[in-house]
Amino acid sequence: MDVSHADEPLLLTPGPVTLSARVKQVMLHDYASGDERVLAELAFCRRYLVGLCNGERSHTAVPIVGSGTSGVEAAIGTFVPRNGKLLIHTNGIYGDRIVEVARRLGMPQASFRTAPFTPPTVAEFEDRLKADPAITHVMVVHCETSTGILNPIEAIADLCKRMGKGLLIDAVASFGAFMLDARALVFDAAVTSANKGLQAPPGLAWIVAKRSALEEAKGNAQSLTLDLWDQHQHMERTGMFRFTPATHLILAMGEALREHQEEGGIEGRQARYRASWRRLVDGMRQMGFRTLLDDADASPIVATFHEPEDPAYSFQALYAGMKRRGFVIFPGRLAAANTFRIACIGTVTPEDIGRALDALADTLDEMGVRIAGRAVAAD
Ligand SMILES: Cc1ncc(COP(=O)(O)O)c(C=O)c1O
């Protein structure tokens, strides 16, 4: 069977991300749910994720089947008690989604929006918390992928600790590439997806949770499948999921985490993403593009660019031209109209980004697009 993927386009999108052939290869096996190899891989994944947060003494990791949003929904539904109230910050699409999840759960909540292109200040959180003592928990997105902005999670965690509020972090895009150090930063739950910085296939969400907070969360969840307390107690007793386990995904996740380890963990992975992002942003600026964010506020996960104003430009034509040349790029989001995004996560290297820049210059040239009155030239 041919399992090479050399002719598939490289995904320069913030999910799904391109996986290594090695990770895809380990899924070519069928295992029963109690098989020793699956049990061992699941245990390894759980240990590894807790280790990434230095949480061996305080935290545990619980997977559930679903995408990142399922993880967000599970965390909110499990950790916020029925008499609790959640404060949600949003400066983009994924913050807005948390508000929607809490609304659907019928949970008492307060939300506040800050400007999408600059990080919020701690004072903005403090004002809301002081004004509403009923708030028990705060939820914030670490890297808001709709723009790429990195929110100041350490300072927000300090505030929550000082004011005795539980903190839930949407770390879906940042986990594995950024440190959330449980020894320095107090949080009840950090939610991630298998398929961003961890570079495993989509389909599992993971929650790294403070053990004491999870123990207190017994009976909170109104959902059976998204009850992290129940999933956790079952996993601790049996080493396995409550329902049919995603065996292929567990094997691939284990392999992806070994790759993460071999790359040098968070530091190594972030260094590659940063090198790719630097090359991307510099190369695009050289062609005349402008980034949506200042570099100081941007994360190396994804970069957002303003579209050229030339009437010869259309995102659809750019997308199609790039795909023909072997790269998939992403449209902008409503929060940032007339933009498009290029991500640096997955198995993408700075050399891939160099080739993508050439492909972009070529495509724009073919479309007859000029930027700021100039024909486009790659670096
Ligand atoms: C920060 C953040 N939160 C949540 C999500 C939602 O994850 P999913 O699309 O896997 O449900 C994403 C997806 O890109 C994200 O970037």
Image (cartoon, helix red, strand yellow):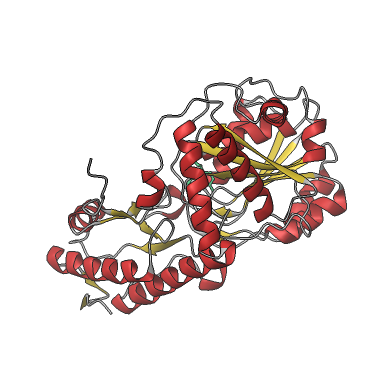
Horizontally, residue 318 falls left or right of residue 352, namely left
Q: Is residue 323 visible?
A: yes
Q: Is residue 26 left or right of residue 222?
A: left
* Residue that appears at 44% across and 58% down: 345
151 shown above or below 201: below
Tell whether 349 sits left or right of 238.
left
Q: Is residue 298 visible?
A: no
* Quadrant of the drawing holding the C terminus: bottom left
Q: Where residue 307 sits: x, y (%)?
A: 32, 62
**Picture coordinates of residue 136 (x, y %)?**
81, 38
Q: Is residue 315 above or below residue 85?
A: below
Q: Residue furthest front?
A: 36
Residue 212 falls in which quadrant of the image?
Answer: top right
Looking at the picture, tell me which residue is in the foreground, 33 or 183. Answer: 33
Query: Residue placed at 57% from the left, 52% from the top?
Result: 91
Q: Position of residue 320 (x, y in %)?
A: 20, 52
**Residue 313, placed above or below residue 171:** below
Observer-nearest of 132 and 246: 246
Residues 7 and 153: in front is: 7
Measuring 63% from the left and 49% from the top, which residue is drawn there? 49
x and y, in percent, of residue 332 in the image: 38, 53
